[in-house]
Amino acid sequence: MDSDWKTQLNIPKKDTRPQTDDVLNTKGNTFEDFYLKRELLMGIFEAGFEKPSPIQEEAIPIALAGRDILARAKNGTGKTAAFVIPTLERVKPKVKKIQALIMVPTRELALQTSQVVRTLGKHCGIACMVSTGGTNLRDDIMRLNEPVHVLVGTPGRVLDLASRKVADLSECPLFVMDEADKMLSRDFKSIIEQILSFLPKIHQSLLFSATFPMTVKEFMVRHLNKPYEINLMDELTLKGITQYYAFVEERQKLHCLNTLFSKLQINQAIIFCNSTNRVELLAKKITDLGYSCYYSHARMKQEERNKVFHEFRQGKVRTLVCSDLLTRGIDIQAVNVVINFDFPKTAETYLHRIGRSGRFGHLGLAVNLINWNDRFNLYKIEQELGTEIAAIPAQIDKSLYVAEDNSAVPVPFPLASLPNTTPNVPGQSLPPQQTHPQFQHPQQFQQPQQFQHPQQFQPPQQLQQVYSHAYPSQAMPPPQQHVAQTPY
Amino acid sequence: MRGNFSHKRRENGDVSTGGGNGNGRSSGPSGTAFFESEDTAKSFDNRLNYLLVNGLGSEVEVTVLSGVRYGGVLVGCNPENSNGIDVVLQCPRIVDASFEPDEADVIAATLKDKLVIKAEDVAELKFNGVKMNQEDKIHKPVGDADAKDVRVDSAEFKTDRDISGGVRGKERELQRWVPEDHETFAVGEELEDSAAPWNQFAVNEQKFGIKSTFDEHLYTTKVNKEDPNFAQRLKEADRIAREIESQGGSGNVHLAEERGIVVDDSGLDEEDKYSGVDRRGDELLASLKSSAKKTAPAPKKYLPPTLRNMPHHNDPAIISSVTSTGGSSSGSATVDRAEPSKKVSQTTKNNKNERNNRLEEFKEFSENFKIPYDMPEEVKSLLKKPEESQTSLKVNPSLPPKPVSQHAAQSTATSTSTQSKKSRNAKPPTPSQTKVELRKGSSRLSSQTQSPVSSPSSSRYATIARRRNANTTSFFGSKPPTADRPKKDLAKNFNFFLKSKEAFESTQDGKNQVVAVFFIERPYSTAPTWFSNVDHSYKALFPDERTAIQKSQMKLQQRNMSAMAAAGAPHMMGYPAMMMGMPMAPGGSHSPFVGAPGGAGGMYMPFQPQPSMYHPMMQMAPAGAEDVMSGGSSPSPASPHGTPMFAGASPHQMANPYGYMGSMQFQPMNSGFRQNYHGGRRHRGHDR
């Protein structure tokens, strides 16, 4: 076991989609070069990580050395793992105290971050807890009676728990902030500073974000100790994302969206609206058009938000309509198209929104529906980002955003690892049935991404059976197949 | 500085440093030249080493024993040699051959990339311009201010704008999206057209067979129910939970949200809350903005966030262009062409609707607008007084005679004033009076809409009437303040240290296990009024006196130019519409300066290039010029406003430090107010 531990690993199928320099431009280090503990390495490799991305290569050794870090790297280039890996390495499972506090701005992002901690730390014996608003506070207090090593949460809830000594942060040497620019924005900053007063005087801080529209110098001077600054960006936008605008009238937006749906080869799409009301209405319209669609915004109940978030990440639904609640940090590898149904106000929002596609250096497409009133905002944001957005062409080259092989796109939880699913159940909870099959290229139906490790839970012939059960379209190719292939 | 710095005895070869002038000794054993104690020797040694270390990489000249002098960059030396110092030169050349030139050529031909000179051969080592000071090394010589700025910038963590450079994204013609002809889609369908709540899970399950598998334990830890003390712990947890949740939001949206408190956040959208970084520094303005937003009704139609709460978003120019281009887009064109007459009537109807909507919005705004502070007693009493003086103003004989309404207003006003004399408490005025006022107000509005260029006299009257007629009801609504309320103790009630201490103690008592931090929140902070974030000092941002003067001269010129351009510039289209709705229309701008030559309502007066305007323009023009810039919205980088630090920024950013387009559109109003301020004051003087 000692020498051949790597052969014992349960490594997922390799994601063969092409990647850009945003994640490939490394010095060539490997994860083993960081002298991480064996259990952590196992978790890393089993999560499908092969080599550290540039930001991981920069940040991990410095963080392991105990220095404060202020880092920026583009959307979806591996920032989360860049702070989770050193966190896991430094946390001692035998010490039954909170040893790392990870702060994020939204509840969904907290769930996701926690899931990453748990996935990478699978073999480390570390308890990671999420604490956000909208969940049962009493349960959170009960959870903290048990040992918790890593606490991931939103500032409001964590401050409440810490100020009542429910969450004991007095021996928490590691403080991490994701989306640091938002966390240091005026609305969050005072909460963060109060939380910091519960941490020991000497602690390590790791600050990460893709955007810094304002300097955070004041905070740096007051709370960071000689921070090591990492800036891997010489441009703001991702290389893999192609951006277009469609200049439409307000009442044409739906029409335009419908056209996009029928023309684009969408794997999964996120559509952003600017008000909660519009989010709901648009999602309704999309289901009326015959596409499966969930929506999420901050005025919903948290259980519903969690459900939507989880199912969309699992790839069960093709489309998600949401507000800016899910603009930052949400990592869904299968998303290849982002549509700004409404154009955002600020450049950082725009950047984070379009960064929902093209994760980890993959290719993606961003389409902005611009109306007459949005045009100055478009110029302004273009200027701030130093980019120019082109008008949408009649035909969009598939190679810009469609991967040839989508079979190995990672999902957060392989079906086999889901607790409530027996080998036979997956057949019932498969990807959405499209009443408009041109929504997606029919070929992709044959290799649904959920089946990453079919051999683990099912003999192949049985699998085939499940397929044909779930996809009658496979036996009888949909008549609309030609629609998808006709040039626009 | 010369001679034998080393305690090592040098047989031959002196090392002369620091210029090699003076009494460089030729040769000979020189061990006895100095009396050297151990200490002295050591300190000389250290100095030599220091010199060599600092000299590495600098230009040196080495004279060898043969008399030839070589120049080059010192890349290495070895002071350990007992004979002196070995020297390595990069890019050697012959500086002084001291023989016949032809021999020098021979030597030069043999020189390669590097030249190693043994210590034995070194007669003199001369450094040129070595920096001996660490400070000098770190702070590179600062030639000019620009170089300094660059250094500062590169030292700081870069913001987004630093990275992007912000060069692209010019204003340009956008290419309209054209739907394809064969497509049949319900044209013109907007989202808001159908609004009914729906259950996404039910619909998606029914239509697409999607079921949920969410389990929170995939993400978080389990609650241990096997614990022997489970029941007790549960009780305790329950108690703490209730305590936390009953705390209130502490004025922070995020805290309130996480405690499950529903706060009115209609002023914020989810972009503000979860994604955008607030660039505003000014708390007061922010609170004004958000409180004003609260009263605005939810718009029935979608508005882009930049335009929300802005009554003038329905710019007639925009509306007409939208309606006209809307007809021309091929999809709907076929339908429209069939019934052209109907379409025309629709557009006019639309326009009328728009106008009504706008009026409604203005009305609602003025009715609901509240200053988000309690009004101090002093101010309240001040506000009451003018009521009494109104009567005298109103009967001013210089006013043109006006029909009944004035009479009514006058008489009721007198009656209220006598009433108020009787009882100091301001009684809510009679309903009849408010009615009169309302009618008057609306009649004025309608008259203005019909003829924006109203005659000077009527507009003048209207302004006065409106202003003087202010009374407690119209100002405070149904809750007029009373004067006999006990005066608050200023020292106590407004001392926020005391207040926060009180608040802290009230949360403390009875709950001793609650360990909260005593945290005084600043009641407000005033951000710099210049465009920046908080981190820079004003000194870094503003030019020194001399450049400021130059700038202002340039601005003066620009002002004249832009004033010319502004008169009748097409982008001022939205202007009259806006003015009309303003509580104080600038009809009163009949100042001695403006009135005579202009004559026509004075609406655009400040922008007209009239010589007599020169004085008022001194005050007005900055705002006016900015309007022109932002109204035109041409982000030309060569803005004449640009102070050095703005050089890269667009005029947008200047007019509008918060990064939101919205505030830009408010600019014209500002100038309107200002103008009115002047005009109004003059009036008062006149009338008395």
Image (cartoon, helix red, strand yellow):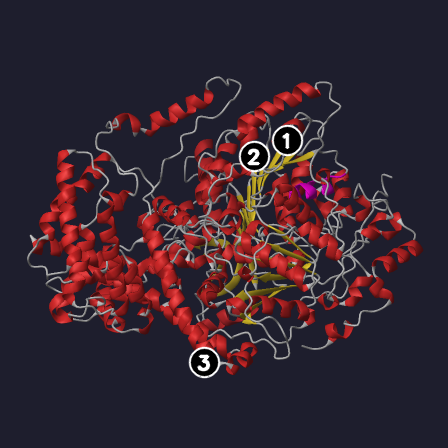
Q: Quadrant of residue B446?
A: bottom left
Magenta residue span: A111-122
Q: CA distance from mark 1 to mark 2?
A: 10 Å
**What residue is pinned by disc 2?**
A157
Coordinates of residue B99 in the picture (x, y in percent): 45, 67
* Left or right relative to A23: residue B643: left
Q: What chain does mark 1 sit on?
A: A
Q: Is residue A355 above or below residue A148?
A: below
- Which comes before the other along the chain, label 1 or label 2? 1
Q: Residues within 10 Å of mark 3 (few under 14, many from 20)?
A: few
* Left or right relative to A428: residue B356: left
**What residue is pinned by disc 3?**
B341
Mark 3: secondary structure: helix
Asked if the residue at tag 2 contacts the one at tag 1, i.e. Cβ–Cβ closer than 8 Å, the answer is yes
Amino acid type, callout 2 = Arg
The residue closer to the viewer here, A74 or A106, is A106
Amino acid type, callout 1 = Asp
Q: Residues within 10 Å of mark 2 (few under 14, many from 20)?
A: many
Amino acid type, callout 3 = Ser
- Say which of marks 3 and 1 sits in front: 3
Q: Is residue B467 above or below residue B556?
A: above
Coordinates of residue B59 in the picture (x, y in percent): 45, 58
Mark 1: secondary structure: helix
Q: Is residue A458 above or below residue B103?
A: above
The residue sitting at 30% across, 38% down in the picture is B479
